[in-house]
Amino acid sequence: MKASVTSPATRRVILVSFDGLRPDLINATATPHLHRLQRQGVTLGRNVTVYPSETRAAMPSLVTGASPGRHGMVGNQYLDRAAVPSRYVDTADDQLVETLDTLSGGRLMGVPSLGEVLAAQGKTLAVLASNSAGTTRLFNHKARTLGHPTISGHFARLATSRSLLEALNARIGPPPPPPPAGTPDLAAQSYLTAALLDIVWPQLRPDVTILSFGEPDSSSHYCGTAEVRTLEALAWADQQFGRVLDWWEAEGRRQDVHIIAVSDHGHVSVHAQADVHQVLRDAGFRCGSAPGQDVDAIVVPGQVGAIYLADPSELKIRRAVAAMTKAPWCGPIFTAGRNDVEGIAPGSFARQLVMADHARSSDILFSYRADSEVDPFGLIGRTWSNDAPIGLGVHGGLHHKEMAAVGILAGTAFRSGSLSEVPSGICDIAPTILHLLGIVAPSQMDGRVLNETFATLPRAAPGSVVETVYEASSSTYHQVLRRIQVGAAAYIEGGFAENAA
């Protein structure tokens, strides 16, 4: 069926995010409604997230169209050395996010976010999210100032106006509390879907709406990547999405609403435990998880390997990296750049090679070593971890299953029932939405407009596609990184490390 030509002035967008969903878990049985959307839109077959593949690095990239090295949200947690004394920041804290934005003069993120760009054009961004409070705020961190609606699936305090909260309470009740760890988070997904269909769309009709399901990520972390409870949570989120899709097929499409489905990263399974602290202690460093008098090396908790040194001299960085690269758990590793490719420590890559070089970046950024063996659930992808128990799902590293992200675009402006094999990434979503609405993307966006997905544009690839494999080695260690350039946009497809031959 030939797509009808519509005007950017009449278009609306609903972006639905499934936190932590691997693209290879989408099929007619497990996720029939996402599968149904694929038949009606364009599936991005080589879509990736940013590095580190962590939610509160990736979601800011989704809404800024920029890499962590540009927007500055370099991980779920980071050390802010600009503060005196240095401040350990956990961006799961929504109130801290707002405080830091105020203290920075409104420049927590160093580039404009989607909400700001839309507001400058007299348009609105609504956010409905069951992620952590901090992630929910980061989708539109200036929502209160801009007067844009935000609704949390768990935290009433995140509602950006009293009238909105009162309308929600009157129509569908208060948001449900977070369930116990290991229990699929089902109620919040239903609550948000009802909020969208019963209140937000009919009463507010935002120009862009983000509906973010916190599953299957939450269940994967506590149960396992494809454990029964995780698949239950995914099926439930897909079912709620099916309610949105039913409305879209019956009404929304005729109202020029476009649907985009994404995920922020994938998951792999932990198969072995690492002890980063012991390796650093053996190298002469006193370790801690936050700044302190007796701490030489701050090892940020979580799956993203981030180490901040009290004395970040080249000598100390080289000493720490030399010790780490001898450990069996050490995957790809990055330091400040000696040039565009090589880091200052032998065997390391430069942080800018993965677009992760920022004033907040750790002195040593690394991934845990991963492989492509099959996990207990029959999925490809296993890794070491310093924190997570064996058998559970994690992300943050450079395995291609962590980097792979869902991308499906549907509506009258897009091709129908097609697969795009042109490399793409999470930074491309914001500029593509703005193009769809007839708005020129800010120059600070690293992403590109996904011209190849539009029905009225040629199918040819947008500019040259150059795939480059980088390698770095030390006496005991060898690492490989795959990077793709499409025109001016760059993507990291994955990386791995192994013992030197």
Image: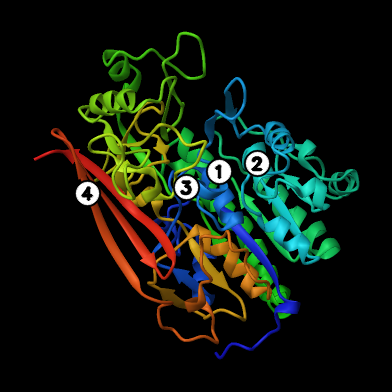
Total labels: the figure holds 4
Q: Position of residue 128 (x, y in %)?
A: 70, 51
Quarter of the image for residue 313 reads: top left
Instruction: Residue at 32% x, 21% y: name it.
Output: 275
Whether pointer 3 and pointer 1 mark residues with C-beta atoms closer than 8 Å, the reply is: no
State the mark number for residue 108. Answer: 2
For the N terminus, give its image quadrant.
Answer: bottom right
Q: Where is residue 24 in the image (x, y as percent from the top left)?
A: 39, 57
For the C terminus, give its image quadrant.
Answer: top left
Give the CA distance from mark 3 to mark 4.
37 Å
Q: Where is residue 149 in the image (x, y as percent from the top left)?
A: 79, 52
Give the CA distance from mark 2 to mark 3.
36 Å
Whether pointer 1 and pointer 2 mark residues with C-beta atoms closer than 8 Å, the reply is: yes
Give the CA distance from mark 1 to mark 2.
8 Å
Kind of residue at disc 2? Leu
Label 4 secondary element: strand
State the mark number for residue 117. Answer: none
**Which residue in the protein does label 1 denote?**
72
Label 3 secondary element: helix
Assess disc 2: are there few (<14), some (14-19) or many (≥20) residues with their C-alpha within 10 Å of its C-alpha. some
Kind of residue at disc 1? Gly
**Which residue in the protein does label 4 denote?**
471
